[in-house]
Image (tube, grey):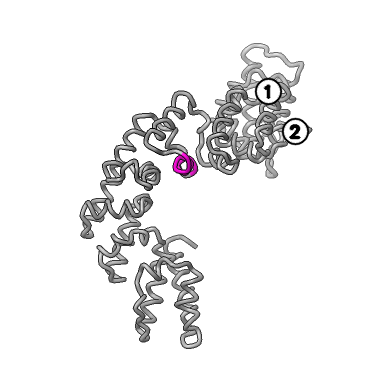
Amino acid sequence: MKRLYHVSFCKTVSSTRSPLSHDAALLFAVFPYSASATAAGTASTTGNHMFMAQCLIDSCGFNQEKATEASKLLNGIQSRQQPDSVLAFLKSYGFDDASVKRLLLYFPKCLLLDVEKTLAPKFRAFEDLGLSPSDIVHLVWSNPSTVKCKHERTVSKIEFWQGLLRSKAALVKLFKKNRGILSCSIEKKIQPNLDLLRECGLDGPKLASILWHRPLVVAQNADFLKSLISRAEDLGVPRTSGMFHRTLCALFTVSPEKFKRQMELFRSFGWSEDDFVVAFQKCTTFPQTSLMTLQRKMEFLINEAGYASSYIGIRPTILLTSLERRLIPRHRILATLKSRGHCESDYKVATYMVISEAKFIEKYIMVYKDRYPDLSELYASLKHSNASDSGLQ
């Protein structure tokens, strides 16, 4: 792909460009910033700093403090052609204003890089790995160190993850969702953690599941991963369990302190510690929910919907459903039907709360549309009002 690298550095990148201030223009006139200009003493150096700072503000959206700080690292720039070519190159790959700003905040000296000798070969190497220009933008956005490091080093890490994930979609997701993942040492951190997981019997699809859902599990220090394994075993989930890998992923997002607070919360609703552990084993993801949200759901299900705490403990997946968009609207539709004499034996929370939206509407609203045409409007208003109350419009 042949790309043209030309843009005016002292024009802003966005469409809402603001002209250079009179002071900046005057500085440029006093201290010409061209290929023939040379740094002549402190005054010239200061002028260059101020000029570069203003350009970073106008072109890349820097604030004054960050621009001044970054400009001190850019003494090597002797003409506008150098930064122009770098910005144009990045734009040619689809970098937007936010992406350029993020990269330059992390690595201002990127503007000193030679496009043809450094940046272009690096990006071509990424393309040779099968990454599209938009993939490369995501890669650099999430891992700006890739521009700073030698591309041979970065390429070897990408190839490692490619071989491990065996999916371009998974690879791109890794870049997007896990910032700095390519900064981790393969030899010192990633590979030893993979070996430890394999010793626990986690290989093949189970290891792939961890890498897809929680790849940062293998990017932690060894002691953390060992403690995670111990926590899972202490909860009665052995390494041989088919739920062991899911348990590790769940515990990774819930600190021991939060887990303990949740156990105490459910104890206040009548659960024993064993009840909580059993519920967790059935549904490893519900502890990821905030304490306040879990408390509100339990209070609604027990106090308004009238379900026993033990009933919910046997069916903890109910706690994954939205209180405002599902639990409250559906319960009140069923309560309305019961008040009108329709009390079917399957009006149980595990049935009407878990089925799909289309199935619920078909079974509990459309069936009664001729007799109770107001049900549909009532359901819509309940969903809207609850969503509005919770900021979920």
Q: Residues within 10 Å of mark 1 (few under 14, many from 20)?
A: few
Residue behind mark 2: 7
State yes or no: residue 154 in magenta. Answer: no
Q: Which x, y percent locates residue 154?
A: 58, 27
Residue range (magenta): 204-212
In the rendered image, which quarter is residue 344 located in? bottom left
**Residue 339, placed above or below residue 217:** below
Residue 288 located left or right of residue 215: left
Disc 2 to disc 1, C-alpha distance: 19 Å
Mark 2 or mark 1: which comes first in sequence?
2
Three-letter code for the amino acid on which mark 2 is drawn: Val
Query: Residue placed farthest to the bottom in the image?
Result: 371
State yes or no: residue 207 in magenta. Answer: yes
Three-letter code for the amino acid on which mark 1 is drawn: Thr
Q: Which x, y percent locates residue 281?
A: 32, 51
Query: Residue placed farthest to the top in the image?
Result: 41
In the rendered image, which quarter is residue 235 located in? top left
Query: Magenta stretch: dominant SS?
Result: helix
Residue behind mark 1: 118
**Residue 301, placed above or below residue 166:** below
Residue nearer the viewer, 139 or 34: 139
Q: Which x, y percent locates residue 128?
A: 68, 32
